[in-house]
Structure formats: structure tokens, C-alpha cells
Image: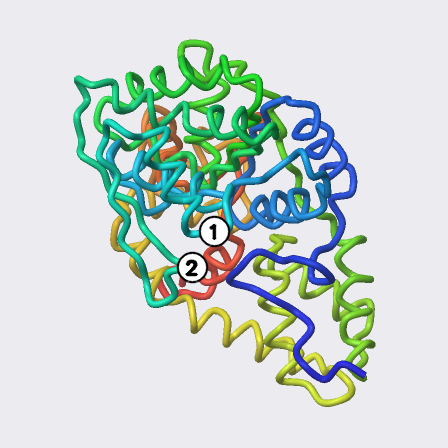
Amino acid sequence: MVTENPFVFGKAAEGTHFTDREEDAKRLTANLTHGINAILISPRRWGKTSLVKKVISEIDRPTMKPVFIDIFQCKSEYEFYHAFATAVIKQTSSKLDEWVELARTFLAHLSPKFSFGPDPTNDFSLSFEWKPKDDTETDILQLPAKIAQKKHIRLIVCLDEFQQVADFTDSVTFQKKLRSVWQHQQEVTYCMFGSKKHWMENIFNDQSMPFYKFGDLMFLQKIPAERWIPFIRTKFQETGKSITVEQAASICEATANLSSYVQHLAWVVWYKSDRVVTDKNIADAIDDLLEQNKVFFKREVEQLSELQLNFLKALAHGITTGFSRKDILREYRLESSANVQSIKKALLKKDLIDMDGQEIAFNDSLFKLWLQRQTFYE
């Protein structure tokens, strides 16, 4: 019998920790194995990274090689190119001498230099002389295709937190550079995804942007409670504990079925409970989770204007449409319907809310719950 906590959070859910998304996994697998670029779009904590890692881990073909690049820390074009070149070389080779050979062969005029970590056979970073006039960017962006041709394989390049490119100086020009090179690479398939839905939609779903129609847009939906409940109950049973359907449902309700939060709350409930989960275990676990996150939630509130906070108060009280009605404007001191429109745009940009048609919802269910419990609501 497994005695370790069977849930995982704070990292991609892999192996037995992954649940559902069978249809999404089939579609993504079909795209990536048939050379169709894929773009995954959804709000934060919906399990995009877990889905991508599951799919690429199960593509067991000697002629296909995945490359996974997280560009969250990239704040400029240079940092992107540095991370891109390092990851492509590192993940397409397994030997130190081959890393050096690839860099010297395909990035020769950039004077590539290696910096090795404690384990030089597994850890290195790559630097090079930055000479844009020498077509540095194109050489680096062509690196996956050149390596694929040399090795007679297809590369699947997965770029996590791709929305970061929208923050680069002259981002549209940068995106044009990427597409102008990548769209001609027959040996490389790209998979892009990120944690800010609004920004990703601007990059990939706006006709005026360079990456419009670059690949198959996959708008992920939440994993429904009817799939989470048996998953939660099975994990408890496998470790000698029991949780009722109603209690598992309450975990889903508190987290609004957000994958990361479901796993996190279930993890806390598991370690707080004995063999039989009690309702108090769940209530205490929710309190603990809110306490752990309150410093982040307070920081969010501090960065809001009074009108933005008033809008979120209304949303937390269950109002999802009709914000321009006179009674809503008056009760929540939103002043005017023109203010409501500007508030929506600002909160979308801050990635605090999501819109489905006219209906608005919190992106972070725990932030909503924390707001509901604050004294400024009384």
C-alpha cells in the first residue's frame, strides 16, 4: 500500500498524478506527430504544462525528439535566443563532445562559449557574441531545423510561458522574426502555451498579429468535477484512507476545478486526515491554503484601484453579468458603465478575470474565496 501523499502540486502532474484530458491529449498528439503546430490557450492552473509533458513523454518514436523550453525568465530578445539555443543543443544531444560540435557547426560565426556546471556531462549554459548585423537571430532560430536535418529526425519544440514575448521591446517585430523563420521549417513542429490567456489570445487569435493562424488553436476547458471526484477518491483509497463523494465534491467546489488547486487542496486534506476524512479536515485545509496565499492576494489588492476592487467585490458576490445596471453601479460604487468597460480591460490585462461571452469569472478561485472573507465586505 502506498503511504506517501498521492497528490502533487507546484509542478507538472505526470504519470499517475495526471487525470482526464484524453481527448485533448489525442488531439495534441495528432498535431505534434503529423507536423501541425499547436497553441494551447486557457487561464492559469488549468494543466497546460502537465498535458504537454504527458503527450511528449508518450511520443515514443526514434525519429521524433521533443525539446522543452520555459521562457518565463526571459525579459528580452537576447535572453530568449540564449535560452532557445541552449535548450535545443542540450536536449538534442546526450554527449559533451556532440554539444560542442553542434554549437561550433551551426553557430560558428557567433563564437559560442560553454559554461559548465558541477556535472559537465549534464549541465551547461551557452553564450555567444551578439552581432545582429551578422544575422545572429536567424542562425539561432534555424538551429532546430539544421539539427533535425543533420540527425534525420523531426523536432517538437515546446515553448512554455510564450506570452512573455509580448513584453519584449518592439514585440511585434520580434514575433515577425520568429514566424518568418519558423513557418518554413518542415522538420520542426512548434507547440506554444502560456499562463496568461488574454495575452496568448492577443498573440495567436488576432488577425493583425504575426502568429495569426500559425497552428491549431486548442482552447482547453476545465476538468469537470465528475472526473475529479473519482480521481480524488481513488487516490485516498490507494493510501488506506476514505473520502466521501460529497467531500471530494467540496474540494472541487472550493477550487472551482482548477487543476493545480484541486491537487493542492487534496494534498493538504490528505495529510490532515486520519483513515477517515472529516468535514473539519476539509475546512481546516481550505483555511491553511488561504493563509499560505494571503501575502500574494494582499499584494494583488494593493495594486488595484478602488473601482477595480469594487468590481471584484461584485464578482465575488456572484454577479457575473449586468455590471452596467444602475442598481449594480450604485451598490458597488462603479460610477458609470464607461468605467465598467475600462475596469474589465484592466483586470483582463492583469490576468485576474476571464470572459466567456458576456459572463465574467475569476481566474483564481482561491483569490475569490479570500476576498469573500475579508472585512472590507462587511
Residue situated in front as seen by the camera: 203 or 148: 148
Dot 1: what SS? loop
Residue 252 place in picture, x, y as percent:
68, 59
Q: If you read the primary sequence from the N terminus, does the residue marked by circle 2 or circle 1 appear first?
A: 1
List the residue tagged with mark 1.
95
Q: Is residue 339 above or below residue 309?
A: above
The answer to whether mark 2 and mark 1 are in CB contact below 8 A is yes
Which quarter of the image is occupied by the C terminus?
Answer: bottom left
Dot 2: what SS? loop
Residue 2 place in picture, x, y as percent:
76, 81
Q: Is residue 192 left or right of residue 303?
A: right
Image point 52% across, 27% down: which residue?
150
Q: Is residue 174 above or below residue 237?
A: above
Report the amino acid beneath label 1: Lys
Q: Is residue 127 left or right of residue 226?
A: left
Residue 159 place in picture, x, y as percent:
47, 37
**Residue 249 is drawn in which quadrant?**
bottom right
